[in-house]
Every structure is written in structure tokens, then in C-alpha cells.
Image (tube, rainbow, N blue to C red):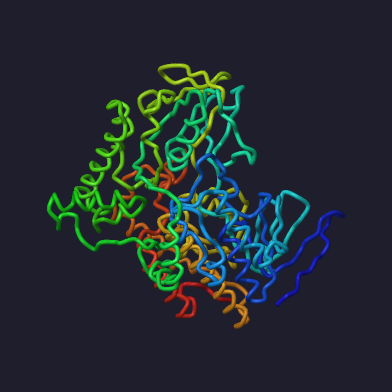
Amino acid sequence: MADEMESHGTSADAVTTEFDAVIVGAGLSGVYMLHRLRELGLTARVLEAGTDVGGTWYWNRYPGARCDTESMFYSYSWPEDLREEWTWSSRYPEQHEIQGYISHVTERFDLRRDMQFETRVTRAAFDETAKRWTIETDGPDTFSARFCIMATGCITKPNLPDWEGVDSFEGETYHTARWPKDDVDFTGKSVAVIGTGSTGIQAIPMIAARAEELTVFQRTPNFSIPAWNGPLDPRHERKIKDNYDKYWDMARWSSTGLMFEIRERSLFDDSEEEREREFERRWAQGGFSFLFAYSDILTDRKANEEVAEFVRNKIRSRVDDPEVAETLCPRSHPFATTRLCVDTDYYETYNRDNVTLIDLRETPIEAVTPSGLSTTDAQFNVDAIVFATGFDNMTGALFSIDIRGRSGEALKEKWAAGPRTYLGIGTAGFPNLFTITGPGSPSVISNMMTSIEQHVEWVADCLEHLTSEGVETIEPRVEAEDDWVEHVNKVANGTLFPEADSWYTGANIPGKARIFTPYVGGVGTYRKKCDEVAAMGYDGFVLA
């Protein structure tokens, strides 16, 4: 393979470094992608805006930050000695532990020497003559690469509401996705938290335990299932590790990429008493298992409503004030059609004397003021505001970079009406550009670890094929891309997902195109399709 080379540009300070591949992002995807490219003998450089590895687990350090996938399956499946030497402390891993795991893997395989931190990629342009990508950064460094691999993540770019006076507040402000590394002490302070999605549901109980007064501003109530988190049972850990290859293979071909008991049975195949028992059993298990009690929960409106009412009744039983409980009960969307949340004492937090819930659907925020927040009903003076307002998901990180393909076409312009990919891996007109867990792949609808590994391995195998066959470029055919986008939408429209105004459809970002972005056809089904495409000589792609 080509050796790493340096060539001087036009500026006296500018240096262009050449690699076989540049990987943007040092999260779970970027770390594994670098490892695989090293195995192929390709030269590669990871460019990361942060100061360390971790990706979303580097940036999201808010109180209570924890993965909602169980730790034993939020790990790389390779190699055997790595999984033996690492032990998770609890059922669901905390942020610092996940980042520690990613750092451990980085050191274990000596990957850090091919990573460059505090380097934000600003532009990536394809040179049709050289058949290489030019990658520019916010510093003096420029890179040239045959392959440009976007490992930028699906949930990366923070969303800050464009309210009047948002910069006028004189107290402390925090966004959960850009939390300070040093501990934030809310002791004795009046705090406002805006947002009750997955992040807010994790952070609110932790902040309430320290703040003198907490006011939660709820935009959309969400369904949440208890985590029942606790120390990891050593016997359970040993059982998983002793059978890891079997379990992981089952996960790869499952619908979710997880090891849940998924019943291929309609809710209405059981009596009302049998359904209630199954719901209670799943509730006692906790986590996402609840969603898979019956096969038609996400496709049958009547079945979905029965599940939703069961969860609403659980909320009512956990919250002392009936009026507050009803405010917390979701009714604007079917169950689990927005991100299903997993919580620890979230609803119980509203039983605390120092916690107040404000329903922004009844009294919207009009402005942020120097002393706090103003709604249509009242002024709230606070010492600190925490924005748990989520992300510009799926495309936000990619659009933050000026990505240019053939004839200078901008990716942002091509995707103006919604992302267009083939398999979520590539997009026509952008040769040798790969998106790891990109739009049109299972990504956020699945266990991210399963989907990350599948994408990285597919891309690595593809690059090995291109190199061995002397192929210079690969990109999707327009027809294949059109067919895949149509298929992704058709599968989504066979479910209840599109009925929700969720970030899955871009509804949380004003002006963003409304299109259901992930592929909900199942991880196993998707893997089979990708394998078939590769086996048929990368059918649907143009190899030049």
C-alpha cells in the first residue's frame, strides 16, 4: 500500500499529508475502522475534534449519562482475549466507563499514533482528476486520501433552540452534549432543565438530588421503561462470555442486533389476562425487552394503544400527584415511535418537594431572559439552565462539513429533500465516500455496536476487494440509490413510526426535510442484503 507522504501546498505553513484513507471521528466506529484498515496494510489517519477518543461518549458527560444498551452487548465482539480482560461494573454502563473501554481498546491495539485530536474537519472535496479526496481542517493541516470514511455518528450535533434572548441569560448555561469535564455543582441553586427525551430522563433525577430547586420544562412527554440497573451479576457475565460467539451471532441476525426474547406472536393471540401477565413480566425485566412482548406492537394501532395505556398506568402508579402524572403521560404519538427511554427513578423524581414540572405544550417558552425563562404564563428566575434539547440527528454532523462530490456538488444540497443513500453506506456522485451507520441503515433503531461492526467490516472488505482488483473508485448507481430510498420508506410506512413527530423524521429541527431516516426492516435482513450485494460483485455500485 501507499506509504504516508507529505507534500507542501501553496502556503508556506500548509502541509498536505497523503493516506490511503482518512477517517473522520474517533468514536466506536472510527476506532474499529482504523483497526481494520491497519490489518489490511492501508495507511490511515483518524481526525477528531475532541481531545480524546470516545465520540458521543466523549462529548456527553452530563449527570446520569449511561448507555441504554446492556453492557455485555455494548462491547466489540473481537477478539476473545479483549472481552475476557474487560469487566463491566453494571448492567448498563456509565459514560466514563464506556469512554474508558474505548480508550483501553485504543491503547491495547496502539491506535492512538494514527489519530489526530483537536482537529475539526471543515471541508472534504473529491478531485475527479486525481481520484482522491482533499480533506481540510480548522487548522493548517490538509489531507489527501483515496478513501474518505465518515465515522461522525448519528447523534452528534447539538440542537440549541433558537428562542429570543437565548444569549442574554446571565447565569450558568449548559448543553447536555457539551458538558464540562469538571464536575458542575448545583448545590443550593435553582436550575431549569429544558427537555425530557432520553438525555433529560437520565439527567433530571441526578440534578434534582443536588439542586435546591429544579424546574423541568417538558416539550414532549416520552414513554420510559425502568432499567432496574445494578451491579453486573458475575454469573451472568460468565455465562455470556462462555457463549459469546453464539450470542453475538444470534444478535447479528436478529431484528434489533440485541439478545432479546422476541415473540413472533400477535398481541391479540393472547387473552387479556395473558397479555397483562406478559406485560408485567417484561416490565420486571426492564429495558427494551418490553417492546418485543408481541410482534405487532409497532404495526397495529390497537395493539400499540393497549401497550401505551399499560405504560401510562405505570406512570400514574409512580407519580403521587394525579395532575402531574397525566402531564407526564404521552398521548401525541404511538408507543415507542419516538426513542423509547430507559430510566432510573425518573417518574419518582416528580414526587420530590423541590421539583416542578412545566408543560410547554400548554404554556410555551416565549423568551430566555437575563434572569431565566419566560413562558406565556410566568417568568421563572433561575441560577442555571440545562438544555437537554437533543441533536440534529442523522445528518447534522455530515452537514457541518462542506462535503463536495463530482462537479463540486454539495452533499447538503443533494440531500436537501432528505438523505439519499444506497444501504446507508454510500451516495451517488460521491466516489470513495463511506458513511458508517449512515441514513438508510438500521443504526439508531438497533444496537449500535452490532451495526457499527457490520458496517466497518463491510467497508473494510470492500476496500480490500477494490485494492486487490485494481479498482480506483466505487459509488452507488443512481437507480440502486433510488430503489433503496423507496424501499426504506416503504418499510417504514408499514409501521407506526412515521406517525410521530420525532427526530427519526427530522421533526425536531425547524426547516429540516421530513423523511423517516433509519432502516426498520431488521438488522439480520439488512445484513443479508449487504452480503448479497458484495457477493454479486458489489451489485448496485459502479466500480471504475
**Residue 246's quadrant in the figure?**
bottom left
Q: Position of residue 220 (x, y in %)?
A: 38, 35
Q: Residue at x 54, y 36 (%)?
A: 160
Q: Residue 536 occupies which quadrant of the picture? A: bottom left
Q: Nearer the viewer, residue 262 or 227?
A: 227
Tell me if residue 129 comes above or below residue 362 in the rendering: below
Q: Nearer the viewer, residue 436 or 112?
A: 112
Where is residue 207 drawn, in percent x and y?
50, 33
* Residue 32 shown left or right of residue 213 in the figure: right
Query: Image height check: is 427 above or below 356?
Result: below
Kindly identify the residue that appears in the image at 45 percent across and 35 percent down: 205
Q: Quadrant of the N terminus?
A: bottom right
Q: Is residue 207 above or below residue 456?
A: above
Q: Quadrant of the C terminus?
A: bottom right
Q: Residue at x 25, y 58 (%)?
A: 295
Q: Position of residue 440 (x, y in %)?
A: 44, 59
Total marks in image: 0
User: Which x, y percent locates residue 65?
Assistant: 51, 44
Q: Residue furthest top?
A: 378
- Residue reaching furthest to the bottom: 469
The answer to whether 297 appears left or right of 30 in the picture is left
Which residue is more in the foreground, 96 or 133?
Answer: 96
181 sits left or right of 424 in the view: right
Q: Residue furthest left?
A: 271
Q: Is residue 94 visible?
A: yes
Residue 406 appears in the rendering: no
- Seen at 48% across and 23% down, the residue is 213
Q: From the viewer's perspective, tell me whether residue 45 is left or right of residue 270.
A: right
